[in-house]
Amino acid sequence: MIKPKALKQGDTIGVIAPASPTTEENVKTAYDKLAEMGFKVKMGKSPYERYGYLSGKDNVRAEDINEMFKDKEIDGIICMRGGYGTPRILDLIDYEAIRDNPKVFVGYSDITALHIAFTQISNLVTYHGPMVSSDIIGSFSDFSRDSLYKAIMGTEAIGTISNPLGEDIVTINGGIAEGTIIGGNLSLIVDTIGTPYEIDVKDKILFIEEVGEEPYNIDRMLNQLRLSGKLQEASGIILGDFNNCVSDKHDENLTLERVIEDHIKPVGKPTIYNLQAGHCEPMITLPFGVKARLDADKKELIILETCTE
């Protein structure tokens, strides 16, 4: 895997919006906040665009990604927010240019589609972490900031990743697994199946998080991962934050915990639940594409190698 250069204070961060739009006020606030954090900032075109529920038409959002990676002045790239539409641009991206110009790339949620494509096609280590409009300009805790900085600015292996105080990790299946971490938002992972960008989890640690889906939808998507063999191929499974994934319609619905048990327990792979990565605050930044060890018995996730050069 290709590791990007570690960021440092004074470096230039490019901001793009590959998914849904935000407001002009948020764009300005995002610029000011990143500058306050000690970075130079270069906004792409997409943060200023709007095309329905998308931050500009497909070609605008794809060109922003391609140009940001090619731009020699840009040291790292962070996404404005998630939302919808990132899979629409997967076939418009210059993956060779990304491979030839490795840079820190940060985002989550709908950005999952880009994480999977970048790691698998461009062999680039990427970072499942906070976005500017969604997180950094809001209630961005010291915990979330420190986790982000440790991943994208650190030059040593992260080591053991710990949850925020008061959030306990739960063991679903015991055992130890090793491999690189891949995954992200469950809906987007499932969306890749049957496409040229289908997630490859063989001998990898599969990370899954979700937001705002009722248990029956989680059931359907986990079942698709099971039927497609993805759960069985993974060396281990990390279940992150499942924010607001509760039923408010039918009393007879299965709980989220029961759905997870039904699908994950029989697979027998080392699995932990409630790692605080995903649509949550505080938030852990996870590096994708670097070696890690999951010790489900000890409820530990250890990053074994550096995330940057």
Image: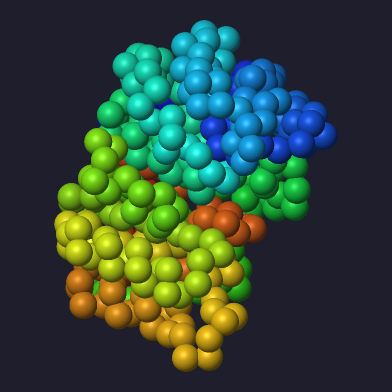
7 relative position to 142: left or right: left
Horizontally, residue 161 falls left or right of residue 76, namely left
Which residue is at a point 57% across and 10% down the rendered structure image?
Answer: 73
Q: Nearer the viewer, residue 9 or 34?
A: 34
Q: Residue at x 53, y 91 (%)?
A: 251
Front residue of 55 and 164? 55
Residue 230 lies in what quarter of the image? bottom left
Point out the residue furthest to the bottom here: 252
Vertical placement of residue 278 versus 104, above or below: below
Residue farthest toward the right in the current orientation of the protein: 25
Taking the spot 20% from the left edge, 64% from the top edge, the residue there is 227
Residue 6 visible in the current orientation = no
Q: Residue 162's x, y, as percent?
A: 49, 60
Above or below residue 1? Residue 236 is: below
Which percent across, then down, holds residue 117?
Answer: 34, 34
Q: Quadrant of the C terminus?
A: top left
The quarter holding residue 23 reads top right
Whether residue 191 sits left or right of residue 39 in the image: it is: left
Looking at the rendered image, the quarter that the N terminus falls into is top left
Residue 23 in view here: yes
Can you give x and y, in whole percent of width and height, for residue 173 in the image? 27, 75
Up-down relation of residue 265 to residue 213 (above or below): below
* Residue 212 located left or right of residue 297: right
| Residue placed furthest toward the front | 52
Residue 124 % position (x, y)? 35, 29
Q: Residue at x 54, y 79 (%)?
A: 247
State the scheme by which the image is colored. rainbow
